[in-house]
Image (tube, grey):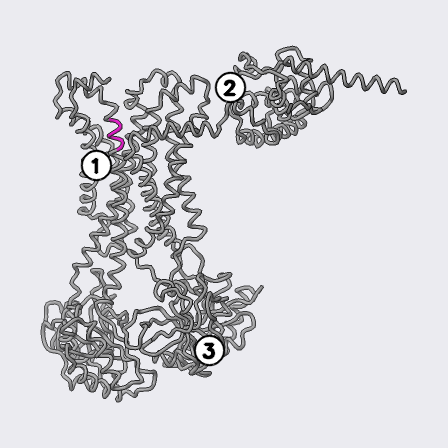
Amino acid sequence: MRGDHLGEFEELTLLSVRALPPPAYALPVQRFIHRTTGRDVALGAVYAALDRLEQKGLVHSSIGQATPERGGKAKRLFAVSPAGTQMLRELRGVRERIWKRIEERS
Amino acid sequence: MPQPRPAPPRAARLLVRLRPLGERRAEIERDLQDLFEVRVQEHGEAYARAHYWRDVLSLWRYRRPRRLLQVGPHRPMTADMLKQDLTFAFRLFRREPAIVAVTVGGLALAIAVATAVFSIVNALALRPIGLEDPTSAVRVWREYRNGASTQWTYNEYVRLREASRLSRVEALIRESAPVAAAPDDQGVSTDVHLVSGGYFSTFDGRVTLGRPLTESDDVPGGPEVAVVNHGFWRRRLGGEPSVVGRVVYFFGRPVTIVGVADRKFTGPVVESAAFWLPLGSAQTLWSSVGPFHAGSTAPVSITARLAAGVSSQAAQSELAALAASIADPAPEKRPLTSGAKFAPADNRGDTRMLVAVVMTAVALVLLLACVNVANLLLAAATTRRREIGMRLALGAGRRRVVRQLLTESLLLSLTAGALGLLAVVWVLPVILSLVHVPETMDVSPDARVYSFAVLVAIIAGVGAGLAPAHAGSRSSLLAWLASDTAHAGTQPRLRRLRSFFVAVQAAASIMLLVVAALLTRAERHVMQRDVGFDVERLAVVNPGFARGRYAAGQSAQYWETALARVKGLPGVEAAALVEHPPFGGSTRTSRARRGLFLVHLNRTSGDYFRTAGIPLFAGRSYTAAEHAIGAPVAVVSRSVAYEFWGSDSPLGHTLTRVSNALSGVQVIGVAEDIAGGLTPDSTRPTIYQPLGPDQRVAALIVRSRIDPAVVIAPVRAALLSIDPTLAPNPWLVRNGLSLQMQRVQALSALGQLAGLLALGLAVTGIFGVTAFVVSRRVPEIGIRMALGASRKDVTRLLTRDALRPVIIGLAAGILVALLGTGVMAAVLHGISPRDPLAIAGAACVLLIAAYIAVLVPVRRATRINPASLLRQH
């Protein structure tokens, strides 16, 4: 299957969407990444990552209600899809297995 | 006072605008702003600004995945949508294919004419002269105590060339001569530049074929060779490479073509020659030039090219010092040379006025065509109100709607532009044939011309699309949805815009029509002008006496024989001698005693008046005896007699009161005034005196019984039979006149072309708008007629409504024309720039055309049965 590979930044973005209280959209994701990693990433990179994740079917997007604080502008809201949750779990499993081996060695 | 809120960098915000973001723009801009504000709070303004820049740039860096573009609710402009827009437009345009074709065709024609005219203006006024680094080429003026002149002696040229270290000095003589394919042909008059041997190498004169002229060509009695101009070779000599080695004839003498100059080469002058010949050999062809040997005082003009890295100032002072040190023996009381000064080789002077006037006319034509396109788009936008309203309702941004309308107009204009560029190939020769641009001028479109055409097409597209797009997107969403397509034509905003367009077209076209009418009036005026004598059957032959070859007495002897032989030729009615033939381009004037009255002085033989057909009012012409000795007698023209003697007869008086120099000369006759040119003030008050024993300055004037062109060859042969070493140069007086007329006719033809084009475009526009408005008012027409209005009433109402903006535009246009045509006074030859006849005529033409353009659709609409009209809606 094409698009099953997840880049490091995509993984980070996907995790952020999962970690944030819904609704998640680009700006909170960017802020979350900054807070947790210290990387003040470019907004364009976040948009691109979210688009790619959506294309791979790992997140869903919907048009949110216009909220007064946003000047009445609608925004795209993201939620992790079941496939996305599955993907995160697999990645976590892979990492944990590897760490386990590392700890066994030392 | 509250602190101003920090704002993101302006330039970066602009950059965001440039990035196509589609429906997501609002969201993204908001995110950027929020993030900026958060960063200001957390890290300070400098940090926030820097990161804002990075965010904006990241929008350009990270492309969105392809597939997403085609699915989901957020769709920016795509090829699919473009296709959709175009399909809509085509469907709409197909309903009125004639109007669309005429509109696009009109714009294409306007662009073609604009491009063609621009390429001529480009060649005439804008393009630098045909030289590499034209600023380093100069014409050198000779300074003397009280003035300056372009004439140097050949000796001065030789010495300047040898001594100058800072510039390279070359000699140039401009002549014109008939060039012929066979020795006996009359040939066509061409410009010939006689140049020194280093001319081509100094001014980087490259050749596309053969070789340039070199030093070895420029020796006295050297080979009779020539380099031909590229355009002349292409247009007149067939453009075959075999031209090198071909022989052409000047004055019946063979000259071999050794090369074809590069297309761009003109030398350090604005107008290229048709042929370049070396000075050394030219003196055997042109009896009037040379001889060219060291010490010769034959006149030449001097051009120079600065050596690399030398300032014009330094080179000029060097030549000035050299020129002053030569102090050449002065031929014929020539004032001593005191220095030299440079003038730019490109001496076209200020051509801004010409360019401005021509380009204004071109812009008006383009404006007319653009308004037609705008009208078409406006009609399209109106018909699509519902669709556009629906789009707005479904969340399409206004930007999107504007873009859609602009895309359509750009497409129309670029199509027209492409067609126009193709059409230039046909339009350019037509315009060239109207304006008589010399063959030697390279008018082929260059990069500048092509950029002009593309720019015009884009400006036309955006310009034409802007107003409808603006009007289409500005009205409120509700208005869009509420409006019924059928009534959309009567929306006040759009109706006003449409009326404004019609008024603009009427104004633009009336201005061009007034100009056309004025130029046509001027042409008529000039053509009907009585020049004072019959020029049709007159020919003039300049004998071409070589400098110093004939003594004064010998010339009288020569002419005695010549006149006898020529008068004996079949077809010759009369022959006489004259110093300055009519329309020959030369004259000698003297300021009379009384103020600014300028008298022309001419010397003739006694039978000149009878030969030229100039009537004598009173007295007599001079006798053969008076002519032979140059007796102190004179014939004055009517205006001289009137100026100095009023209603009294001048006969028997002396010319003392005219001028001291003429004090002993007795008036024996009064002749009709003749014109020196075509303008009404060109009447030449003339004093005619006998030639006297020195007849070297005389030319032969012949009146023929038949077409003078037929008589020329035997007359020339007769002169050659007396002295075969001479090079007699014949020309027709009517050609001298028609040369002046050509300019008038060319201008008038151009004006008529512009006027016709303007009228056609305006009529198309008025017709299109009326047809559209009337079709939208069909229900109203039906109601009116059902309620008892007669067909006549309705026609009158609709016609009045449609013509109102035309009349407003007409009035405005005439007002502007009255203010602006003053700049044309110089080319109107006495017709007032505010000539009422021309203005009224132009207004009539436009009104009649507009009336017909309005009446046709109106009648079509009112001819339908009112009942069916109502049922339909």
Camera-nearest residue between B451 and B576: B451
Amino acid found under the numbered disc labelled 1: Ala
How busy is the neighbourhood of tag 2: few (under 14 within 10 Å), some, or many (20 plus)? few
Q: Label 3 marks which chain's residue?
A: B
The relative height of residue B450 versus residue B792 in the rendered view (above or below) is: below
Q: Residues within 10 Å of mark 3 (few under 14, many from 20)?
A: many
Real-space CA distance between mark 1 and mark 3, rounded to the nearest whole angstrom: 66 Å
- Along the horizontal axis of the image, is A23 left or right of B592? right
Q: Estimate how packed mark 1 is, as few (under 14), some (14 to 19) or many (20 or more) residues with alpha carbons within 10 Å.
A: many
Task: Tell if the residue under mark 3 belongs to the same chain as the one under mark 2.
Answer: yes
Q: Quadrant of the N terminus of chain B?
A: top right
Q: Earlier in the sequence, mark 3 or mark 2?
A: 2
Dot 2: what SS? loop
Which residue sits at x=14%, y=83%?
A: B623
Tell me the residue at 38%/76% (across/down). Answer: B255
Give the magenta range.
B768-773
What predominant SS class does the magenta segment belong to?
helix
Q: Which residue is mark 3?
A: B217
Q: Secondary structure at mark 1?
A: helix
- Please state the horizontal and vertical placement of residue B557, each as a whole percent of the image: 23, 88
- The answer to whether marks 1 and 3 mark residues whose Cβ atoms lie closer than 8 Å is no
Tell whether B495 sits left or right of B157: left
For badge 2, the amino acid type reads Pro
Q: Position of residue B853 (x, y in %)?
A: 21, 35
Earlier residue among tags 1 and 3: 3
Residue at the extreme front: A1
Give the residue at mark 2. B73
Q: Label for residue B850?
A: 1
Answer whether residue B145 is visible to the viewer in this image.
no
How many angstroms separate mark 2 from mark 1 (CA)?
49 Å
